Image (cartoon, helix red, strand yellow):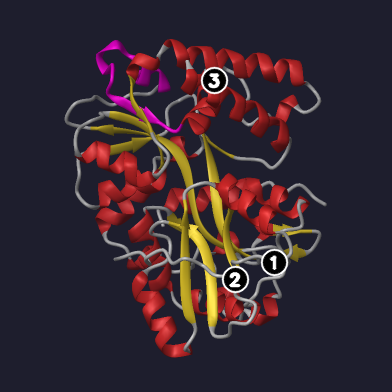
């Protein structure tokens, strides 16, 4: 199997250009005997409710959405279900794809069954980021990155992640520990993606411990460790926090809605990622899954709706032309900041996951 690294330049071009309601979560039941149903596990605000309603009306296929907020939870659920999954489509990030494939949880797409596959943006034509040994394993959806978000009424522009640790912001910052730990490693001059640590566990552990100890020493700056994008959005709206490490989507959505939030990539750099829809092995409703994926790619309006809801850059062609000036501004970055994005790699993921998970638990317990 080839490594599933993203095509960095093409994806950065899409991010640099700046490219309703969410379905209520259903209780997904085993669906072996079901027809006219498609079960989807995805993130909050990824699939527009208006699209779901129109799709159900046009096809008679019921869409059942189960919300998730973590790749690990999705992986663990599919692994536990084994050969009898309760979902048909899952949302996987590019750098975690190899983990799902190694456990034989996904199947290659029959692209011939998705007539609208060619409607992807130029950077994703043919889905090169999701192609392994000539087989395509997902439909690109949304691209994003980890950024520094700040309330512009209480903070000043900054060029460094170190701003998060200034004494004036005691109790006024927030972050996802596992994500921010990688960024702190980069801030300290180490490899937060662990690619260069392959076969070097001692060096990797020392770098991890250094970042862990730094975050423990600066625990007084944190108002709350959060898990979901909606949490950090609410904290900004309540003015509980002034600074946060956040996925670009939740921050961009606040900017689109007119809130005093700015999003940037500090000089030390950050990490980017790509979300895709993938069909589960032994999906109980594979035919319906293909119909859903094809319908989703039918028009740029659907991609634009996904972008407006999530704040992430759409992978669908023609979306940029449908966005307002404010929406495009919320999604775009200065070129020098775009160049600071390093897309997560699939290399050495097990070492990274193990060390990050352990350090995360230690930070919480400290």
Which residue is under mark 2? 30
Question: Residue 347 lies in what quarter of the image?
Answer: top right
Kindly state the secondary structure of the residue where label 2 is placed: loop
Pointer 2 local density, CA inside 10 Å: few below 14, some 14–19, many at least 20: few
The residue under label 1 is 84
Above or below, 273 against 133 in this view is: above
Measure how far apart labels 3 and 2 are at the Cα level: 37 Å
Q: Is residue 197 above or below residue 70?
A: above
Residue tagged by mark 3? 362
Distance from the alpha carbon under mark 3 to that under mark 1: 35 Å
- Image location of residue 3, percent across then percent down: 76, 47
* Residue drawn at 75 percent across, 15 percent down: 202
Q: Magenta includes 110?
A: no
Inspect this view and state whether residue 192 appears. Answer: no
Residue stretch in magenta? 161-176
- The foreground one among 151 and 366 is 366
Determine the secondary structure under disc 1: loop
Relative to 245, 132 lies left or right: right
Please give the name of the residue rendered at 26% of the width and 42% of the height, measured from the top-left corner.
Answer: 234
């Amino acid at each position: 199997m080839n490594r599933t690294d993203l095509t960095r330049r093409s994806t950065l071009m899409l991010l640099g250009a700046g490219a309703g309601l969410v379905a209520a979560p259903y209780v997904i039941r085993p669906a072996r005997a079901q027809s006219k149903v498609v079960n989807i596990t995805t993130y909050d605000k990824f699939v527009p409710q208006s699209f779901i309603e129109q799709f159900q009306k046009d096809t008679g296929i019921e869409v059942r959405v189960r919300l998730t907020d973590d790749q690990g939870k999705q992986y663990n659920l599919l692994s536990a279900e084994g050969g009898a999954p309760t979902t048909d489509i899952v949302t996987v990030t590019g750098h975690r794809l190899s983990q799902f494939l190694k456990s034989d949880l996904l199947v290659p797409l029959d692209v011939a069954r998705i007539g609208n596959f060619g409607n992807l943006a130029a950077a994703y034509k043919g889905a090169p980021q999701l192609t392994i040994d000539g087989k395509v394993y997902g439909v690109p959806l949304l691209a994003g990155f980890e950024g520094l978000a700040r309330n512009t009424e209480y903070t000043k522009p900054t060029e460094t992640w170190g701003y998060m640790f200034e004494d004036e912001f005691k109790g006024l910052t927030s972050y996802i520990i596992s994500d921010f730990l990688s960024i702190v490693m980069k801030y300290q001059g180490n490899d937060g993606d662990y690619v260069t640590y392959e076969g070097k566990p001692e060096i990797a552990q020392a770098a991890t411990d250094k970042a862990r100890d730094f975050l423990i020493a600066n625990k007084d700056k944190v108002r709350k460790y959060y898990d979901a994008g909606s949490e950090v959005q609410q904290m900004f709206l309540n003015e509980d926090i002034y600074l946060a490490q956040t996925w670009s989507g939740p921050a961009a959505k606040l900017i689109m809605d007119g809130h005093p939030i700015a999003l940037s990539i500090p000089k030390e750099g950050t990490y980017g990622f790509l979300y895709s829809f993938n069909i589960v092995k032994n999906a109980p409703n594979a035919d319906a899954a293909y119909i859903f994926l094809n319908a989703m790619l039918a028009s740029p309006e659907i991609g634009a709706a996904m972008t407006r809801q999530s704040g992430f850059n759409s992978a669908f062609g023609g979306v940029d032309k449908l966005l307002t000036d404010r929406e495009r501004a919320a999604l775009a970055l200065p070129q020098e900041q775009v160049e600071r994005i390093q897309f997560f790699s699939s290399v050495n993921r097990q070492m990274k996951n193990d060390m990050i998970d352990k350090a995360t638990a230690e930070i919480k317990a400290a």
